[in-house]
Amino acid sequence: MEFKTNITVTIHNGRDKSEHTFENEELSITRATKLWIENKSEGESEFYETIKSTYSIDKNVGKFSNYTIKTSEVTPVESFREYYVTKIDEEKQAITFEWAGY
């Protein structure tokens, strides 16, 4: 399903926490056993670029972040869950997340 929504992401890495807010993101969001978020705007997605950058840094240092994601619209994102990134698809500008602590 496609959404135009604001997204607030809290990134947890060890003891460090940072919060980022992205406005008017145009995304396709689906959820089954994994959460799939794909950029649907004509331009770049700040949300996608931030997660991609964080994931790239995580891979280099070998310590991966968890994410809490909240949307301003009703979406398949479960804001009470912590997620981690399992795959970045650069061609589609999409991210696959799984639930942490499962």
Image: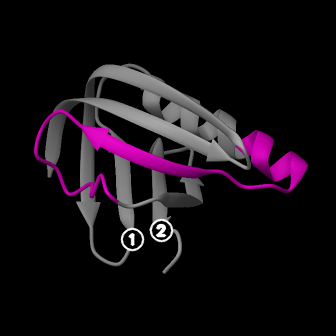
Residue 74, magenta (yes or no): yes
Determine whether, in the image, residue 17 is placed left or right of residue 42: right
Residue 8 image-quadrant placement: top left
**What is the secondary structure assignment of the residue under circle 2?**
strand
Q: Is residue 78 above or below residue 57?
A: below
Residue 97, magenta (yes or no): no
Residue at image mark 2: 98
Q: Farthest front residue?
A: 15
Q: Amino acid at mark 1?
A: Lys
The magenta-colored residue range is 56-80
Mark 1 crowdedness (10 Å alpha carbons): few <14, some 14-19, many ≥20: some
Percent coordinates x, y for residue 48 in the rendering: 48, 35
Residue at image mark 1: 34
Determine whether, in the image, residue 83 is placed left or right of residue 38: right
Q: How is the image coloured?
A: one colour
**What is the secondary structure assignment of the residue under circle 1?**
loop
Which residue is nearer to you in this view: 82 or 44? 82
Q: Amino acid at mark 2?
A: Glu
Q: Is residue 60 above or below residue 43?
A: below
Q: Are marks 1 and 2 in contact (CB under 8 Å)?
A: yes
Residue drawn at (55%, 59%), measured in percent from left and top? 84
Residue 78 image-quadrant placement: bottom left
Which residue is nearer to you in this view: 37 or 72? 72
State the CA–CA distance, disc 1 to disc 2. 5 Å
Residue drawn at (65%, 51%), measured in percent from left and top? 65
Which labelled disc corresponds to residue 58? none
Residue drawn at (56%, 40%), measured in percent from left and top? 11
Residue drawn at (39%, 23%), measured in percent from left and top? 21
Q: Is residue 96 above or below residue 55?
A: below
Q: Earlier in the sequence, mark 1 or mark 2?
A: 1
Percent coordinates x, y for residue 31 in the rendering: 27, 66
Percent coordinates x, y for residue 58 in the rendering: 77, 47
